[in-house]
């Protein structure tokens, strides 16, 4: 936890030099697919929605960082996520995205798993996400991302995986 706080402090300090003219706030929303990956089980994907808010911090003409806070719900699973996506602009409209996602899972299915597994379960979901974005105008854009869960929700001694990967497709608006 101390390392995470230290990394966040360095990120804030490093981003404090960002030109305020290049900073935009916005909202995003769209389709979310939560894809459980469970050892020895055939877990179905759940489709739902996500909404969120972000700050697009322009570092240079070709590079920006976009911290986000999002909420996703699909089936009986919900997730709050804090994302920090680095965006590289291949052209004026098209960008490639990558970055970490820290999520906190909830909902009826997650609560049932936590009750069944007990202390060997964590609701924290660490992902590495990759995506593409396209800006139609200066304010309106579309993006798609896939997030690979790096940690395991099951923390016990048995050789078992319990992960939730995500696919999001949505639109956003910069103010």
Image: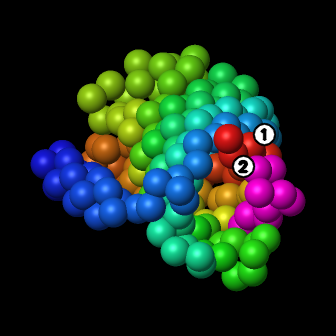
Residue farthest front in this picture: 21
The residue under the point 76% across, 50% down is: 139
Relative image position of residue 174 (x, y in whole percent): 69, 45
Given the current orientation, which residue lies at the most extreme right position?
136
Q: Name the residue under label 1.
A: 30
Camera sees residue 162: no
In the picture shown, does residue 83 fall above or below 30? below
When the figure is inspected, residue 69 is found, relative to residue 94, above or below; the finding is above
Q: Count the marks: how many? A: 2
Across and down, in percent, residue 1 comes to 18, 46
- Please, what secondary structure does the residue beneath circle 1 have? strand
Is 26 magenta? The answer is no
Describe residue 78's horizontal placement relative to residue 124 as left or right.
right
Alpha carbon distance from label 2 to label 1: 7 Å
* Residue 18 x/y as whole percent: 41, 62
Q: Give the range drawn in magenta.
A: 132-140
Q: Nearer the viewer, mark 2 or mark 1?
A: 1
User: Residue drawn 72% across and 49% down?
Assistant: 168
Say which mark, if any, is on residue 168: 2
Residue at position x 74%, y 64% from top? Answer: 133
Residue at left offset 80%, top offset 50%:
140
Horizontal and vertical percent position of residue 10: 23, 60
Q: Quadrant of residue 70?
A: top right
Whether the magenta-drawn stretch holds residue 136 is answered as yes
Position of 68 relative to 7 (above/below) = above
Q: Does residue 69 show up?
A: yes
**Crowd rating for badge 2 (residues with CA inside 10 Å; few <14, some 14–19, many 20+):** many
Q: In this view, does 58 lie to the left or right of 44?
A: left
Q: Nearer the viewer, residue 15 or 4?
A: 15
- Residue 80 lies left or right of residue 132; in this view the side is left
Q: Which of marks 2 and 1 is nearer the N terminus?
A: 1
Kindly indicate whether the residue at mark 1 contacts the one at mark 2 (C-beta within 8 angstroms): yes
């Amino acid at each position: 936890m101390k390392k995470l706080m230290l990394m966040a402090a360095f990120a804030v300090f490093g981003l404090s030099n960002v030109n305020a003219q290049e900073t935009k706030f916005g909202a995003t929303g769209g389709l979310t697919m939560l894809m459980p990956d469970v050892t020895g089980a055939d877990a179905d994907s759940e489709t739902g929605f996500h909404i969120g808010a972000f700050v697009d911090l322009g570092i240079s003409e070709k590079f920006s960082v976009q911290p986000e806070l999002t909420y996703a719900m699909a089936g009986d699973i919900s997730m709050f996520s804090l994302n920090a996506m680095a965006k590289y602009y291949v052209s004026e409209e098209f960008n490639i995205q990558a970055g970490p996602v820290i999520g906190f899972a909830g909902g009826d299915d997650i609560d049932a798993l936590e009750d069944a597994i007990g202390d060997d379960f964590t609701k924290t979901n660490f992902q590495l996400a990759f995506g593409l974005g396209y800006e139609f105008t200066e304010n309106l854009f579309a993006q798609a991302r896939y997030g690979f869960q790096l940690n395991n929700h099951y923390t016990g001694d048995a050789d078992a995986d319990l992960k939730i990967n995500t696919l999001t497709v949505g639109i956003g608006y910069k103010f």
